[in-house]
Amino acid sequence: MSLTPSSETPLYQQVKDYIVGRIVAGDWPEETKVPSENELTRELRVSRMTVHRALRELTAEGWLERVQGAGTFVAPPKPQSEILAVRNIAEEIRARGHEHSTEILFVRRERARALEAKHLGLERGETLFHSLIVHRENGRPVQLEDRYVNPKMAPDYLEQDFTVLTPHKYLMQAAPISEAEHLVMAVMPTPEERKLLEMKAGEPCLLLRRQTWSRRQPVTWARLLHPGDRYRLGGRFAGEGPRP
Amino acid sequence: MSLTPSSETPLYQQVKDYIVGRIVAGDWPEETKVPSENELTRELRVSRMTVHRALRELTAEGWLERVQGAGTFVAPPKPQSEILAVRNIAEEIRARGHEHSTEILFVRRERARALEAKHLGLERGETLFHSLIVHRENGRPVQLEDRYVNPKMAPDYLEQDFTVLTPHKYLMQAAPISEAEHLVMAVMPTPEERKLLEMKAGEPCLLLRRQTWSRRQPVTWARLLHPGDRYRLGGRFAGEGPRP
DNA sequence: GCACCAGTGTTGTATATACAAGTTGGTATA
DNA sequence: TATACCAACTTGTATATACAACACTGGTGC
């Protein structure tokens, strides 16, 4: 086996292609021990550093697993994760060119109960901020935003005018997101929620649980409830090769 | 400025931390030209290859943009849209280490009606493949997979044994995804669906509409229905730390 | 005034070398 | 037999060097 040194594609990429080729061809099934860097260096006639870079990148891309001292192994089939873009609701409505309004039910200080405390990294009984807001598009409710905020990360939360700057945007600038976690599920609204969202009985909701961190510190924990007949969460992903 | 060579964290990581620190601190606003590799080599007292690795990884992570011959620049802030990983159901169950079974209701040839034809880029009346499968985890249904397949892109679809290789995995290898579109919504199941998923009355479902393309050609159009009380779609996105 | 070109600086790749850090398996020893 | 130890091998990091590829600048010649 030999690669073509003076090609368009760099050598490390050719090494990557070679290895991925062996994997998808079935030559190296899951958990197989891949030849060591030194072996590949001899087989492919490239330097160890080049092989090393290829293996490191394939590891980051989920093709391989490496154990220092032990070897390199074909990773179990990728958790076929596709990608879905979760847009901020207000932004999305603006993007659609529709009218958007914000109805603030309350923005206040509360004592943390066990669950909120856990999610925001606080102690039970510590104060936190809690806001409840209805977002409307063309007059109809599209989101009930129930949000808890860590006062240490956004101390001015209570003073904001959320009809001007949405909580999401304010928090983005107050404590830039370094990490975010989403959970999407289908639920039935409570009677109060149903009333606030002006829904008919028996209709389901799309619930988005959203938690964000800034510099490893929890910032906010939000429950975003959408009427099932009025809101869809969509995303499109283009591209073959893995991306960052 | 000097780094600590014999620390826990590798030097290239320290270089990355230094640069990200300057960016989030506002020292280097968007579009700023970052010091060149040679300058950073002198400033931080590490080799150029170490600086290079740090800059390359930060570029892959979206912090920087590099132009060969011109320099390195701070990338504009990432678009508002967060990211959600949509995993393949069977893979996810395996990842959770649970038992997974596949119940095939039918896999057959059909004539395309208007809607399917449109999504698969066919003419009305052309033949297509249609499968209906229930995925179970620990004995309980977790997904009803209603899938239409373009026979031009996966001609052997009918001959597959989907208890061995799930439709998703088969299609992945038959026609690697170049593009994918998802739509998530909350719906109420029809009585038949409710029965197949063994759900109680009045419970909502999470519906994932999934369409994929391979080399610009539509491959499959699927309707993935999950019981709301048994399935959640989750994803985590890290913006700062390593690991794309 | 304009086109061209060479020089300089930048990023990108490839290699060789060295050592650190971890795993594994075999061997000597108690 | 059981244990301790060590040698060999693996991956991980760091450096120095070299050259290629590309962008920009300034000067030269026309």
Image (cartoon, coloured by chain):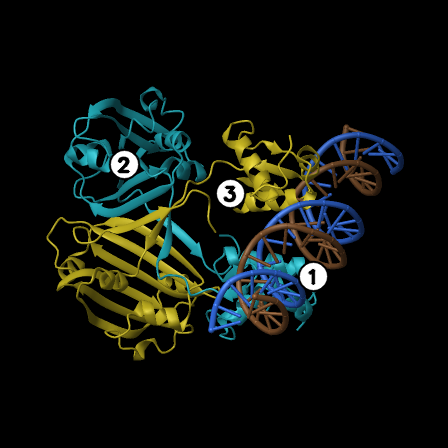
Chain colours: A yellow, B cyan, C blue, D brown
Q: Is residue C6 above or below residue B153?
A: below
Task: Characterize the local packing of mark 3: few (<14), some (14-19) or many (20 or more) Cα atoms within 10 angstroms.
Answer: some
Which residue is label 3 attached to? A62
Q: CA distance from mark 3 to mark 1?
A: 29 Å
Q: On the rendered structure, is B125 left or right of A169? A: left
Could you tell me which chain the residue with mark 2 belongs to?
A: B
Badge 3 marks a residue whose secondary structure is loop
Q: Is residue C30 above or below residue A140?
A: above
Q: Position of residue B180 (x, y in %)?
A: 34, 43
Q: Position of residue B209 (x, y in %)?
A: 26, 42
Badge 2 marks a residue whose secondary structure is strand
Dot 1 or dot 2, earlier in sequence: 1
Q: Is residue A239 above or below residue B114?
A: below
Q: Which one is nearer the viewer's eye here, A54 or B102?
A: A54
Q: Position of residue A117 (x, y in %)?
A: 39, 65
Q: Which one is nearer the viewer's eye here, A58 or B162?
A: A58
Q: CA distance from mark 2 to mark 3?
A: 25 Å
**Residue A87 showing in the rendered view:** yes
Say which quarter of the image contains residue B97: top left
The number of numbered badges drawn on the structure is 3
- Tags 1 and 2 both on a single chain: yes
Toward the bottom, the furthest residue is A159
- Disc on res. B222: 2
Q: Is residue A77 above or below residue A106?
A: above
Q: On the rendered structure, is A145 left or right of B83? A: left
Badge 2 amino acid: Ala
The residue depicted at 38 percent of the width and 54 percent of the height is B83
Q: On the rendered structure, is B136 left or right of A2? A: left
Badge 1 amino acid: Ser
In contact (CB < 8 Å): disc 3 and disc 1: no
- Tags 3 and 1 both on a single chain: no
